[in-house]
C-alpha cells in the first residue's frame, strides 16, 4: 500500500518521524467532479497530519495502520468531492468570504494541526507542492461551503438555550488554545541503532521496545524500566519530564499523548532515532474560550446536528446527479 503512495511524504517535525525519501509524484488527479479536478496534492496535504500520527502509533504498519490510513484518505477525498459538488450547486449565488476571516481560519488550523508552528506548516505545504495562496483558496472554498450549507438549511428550528449549553459543554475542550497545553510523563527511549550493542538492528530494537512496553503493561515500574533500558538524558530520572509545553512536542506526538489516558502505557511509538514508550502522569490544558465568544459557532453546530439527516439526503441526491470519477490510488 505505502509503496503506491509516492506522492505522500511523512512530515518533518520536532522529535518525531524521519523524513521519507520516496520521489514525489508530479501532481496527479485524485478525482474529477463535473470536470473539475481534485489533485493528489490536495488530498496529501489534508491527510499528512493524520498519516504522521498513525505511522507514529504503528511502527510495524500492519492491518490496523492500513485500515486507519484508508479510512482517513477516503473520508478526506469524499469531503473534497462533496465540496466541489456544493460549490457547483451554488456558484451562481456569488457568495464571498472576507479575506480576514480566511486568514483567521488558516491560523486556527495551523494552531490545531501544527501546534502553531508556522515553519512546520510551510514545510508541509512545500512537500505537498502547494502554495500558501493555494491553501488559502482551499480554506475559502471550505468556508463558502459551510456558509452555503447554513443558507440551504436556514429554516432549521433555532437552537434552544439548553441545546447551546450542552453542545458547548461537549466540545469546549476542543476549542481551547492548545498552544498553552502542558504535559508531564515518564519516557523510555530505545534507539534504533545502539552503539553499545553492535549486533542490534532496528528490528531487534523494536522487539526490545515491545517487550519493555509489555512489562510495563503487566505492572512493572516504568521508572525502573527507564533507568534500566532508556538511552536518553532523562534515564536516571526514571524518564521523568515535567510540565513540558505542547509546542515542544511534534504535532503527532502531542496529539497521541494528550488523547491518552493518564497512568497508562503508550507505545512503542516511532520517532526519527528509535522507539518511545510513554506513561503520562499529568496534563494542564490550555484556556477554554467563554461561551459568549464562540456562541455563533456553537449555534451553527447545533443547527447542523438538527439538519444532518436532511443534509445527508440532499447531498446524496446531488452526488447521484454529478459526474464523478476517481483515479486509482
Image (spheres, rainbow, N blue to C red):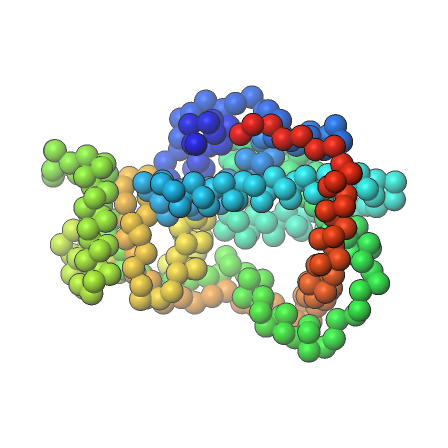
Q: Where residue 237 appears, x then y in whole percent?
A: 20, 60
Q: Is residue 126 visible?
A: no
Q: Quadrant of residue 288?
A: bottom right
Above or below 316: residue 326: above
Residue 10 is left or right of residue 95, and the answer is left
Considering the image in quadrants, where does the N terminus appear?
top left
Q: Where residue 242 appears, x then y in whole percent?
A: 32, 63
Residue at 32% in and 56% down: 266
Instruction: Determine the residue located farthest toward the bottom in the rendered image.
Output: 162
Q: Where residue 24 appears, x then y in whole percent?
A: 49, 24
Residue 188 is left or right of residue 76, and the answer is left
Q: Is residue 180 visible?
A: yes
Residue at 16% in and 61% down: 224
Residue 40 is left or right of residue 200, and the answer is right
Above or below 22: residue 104: below
Residue at 38% in and 42% down: 63
Residue at 50% in and 57% down: 179
Given residues 34 and 262, the one toward you in this image is 34
Amino acid at each position: 500500500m505505502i509503496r503506491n503512495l509516492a506522492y505522500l511524504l511523512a512530515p518533518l517535525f520536532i522529535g518525531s518521524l524521519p523524513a521519507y525519501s520516496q520521489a514525489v509524484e508530479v501532481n496527479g488527479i485524485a478525482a474529477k467532479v463535473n470536470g473539475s479536478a481534485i489533485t493528489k496534492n490536495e488530498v496529501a496535504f489534508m491527510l499528512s497530519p493524520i498519516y504522521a500520527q498513525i505511522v507514529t502509533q504503528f511502527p510495524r504498519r500492519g492491518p490496523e495502520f492500513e485500515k486507519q490510513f484508508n479510512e482517513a484518505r477516503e473520508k478526506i477525498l469524499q469531503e473534497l468531492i462533496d465540496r466541489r459538488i456544493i460549490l457547483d450547486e451554488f456558484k451562481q449565488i456569488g457568495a464571498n468570504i472576507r479575506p480576514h476571516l480566511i486568514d483567521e481560519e488558516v491560523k486556527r488550523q495551523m494552531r490545531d494541526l501544527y501546534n502553531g508552528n508556522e515553519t512546520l506548516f510551510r514545510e508541509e505545504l512545500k512537500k505537498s507542492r502547494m502554495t500558501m495562496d493555494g491553501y488559502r483558496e482551499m480554506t475559502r472554498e471550505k468556508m463558502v461551503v459551510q456558509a452555503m450549507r447554513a443558507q440551504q438549511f436556514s429554516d432549521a428550528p433555532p437552537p434552544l438555550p439548553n441545546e447551546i449549553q450542552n453542545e458547548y459543554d461537549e466540545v469546549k475542550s476542543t476549542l481551547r488554545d492548545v498552544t498553552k497545553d502542558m504535559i508531564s510523563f515518564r519516557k523510555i527511549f530505545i534507539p534504533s541503532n545502539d552503539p553499545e550493542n553492535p549486533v542490534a538492528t532496528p528490528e531487534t530494537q523494536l522487539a526490545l521496545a515491545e517487550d519493555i512496553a509489555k512489562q510495563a503493561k503487566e505492572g512493572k515500574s516504568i521508572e525502573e524500566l527507564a533507568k534500566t533500558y532508556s538511552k536518553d538524558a532523562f534515564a536516571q530520572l526514571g524518564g521523568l519530564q515535567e510540565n513540558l509545553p505542547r509546542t515542544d512536542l511534534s504535532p503527532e506526538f502531542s496529539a497521541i499523548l494528550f488523547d491518552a489516558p493518564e497512568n497508562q502505557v503508550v507505545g512503542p511509538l516511532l520517532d526519527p532515532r528509535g522507539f518511545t514508550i510513554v506513561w503520562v502522569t499529568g496534563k494542564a490544558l490550555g484556556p477554554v474560550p467563554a461561551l459568549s465568544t464562540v456562541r455563533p459557532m456553537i449555534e451553527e453546530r447545533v443547527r447542523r446536528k438538527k439538519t444532518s439527516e436532511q443534509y445527508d439526503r440532499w447531498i446524496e441526491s446531488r452526488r447521484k446527479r454529478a459526474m464523478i470519477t476517481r483515479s486509482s490510488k
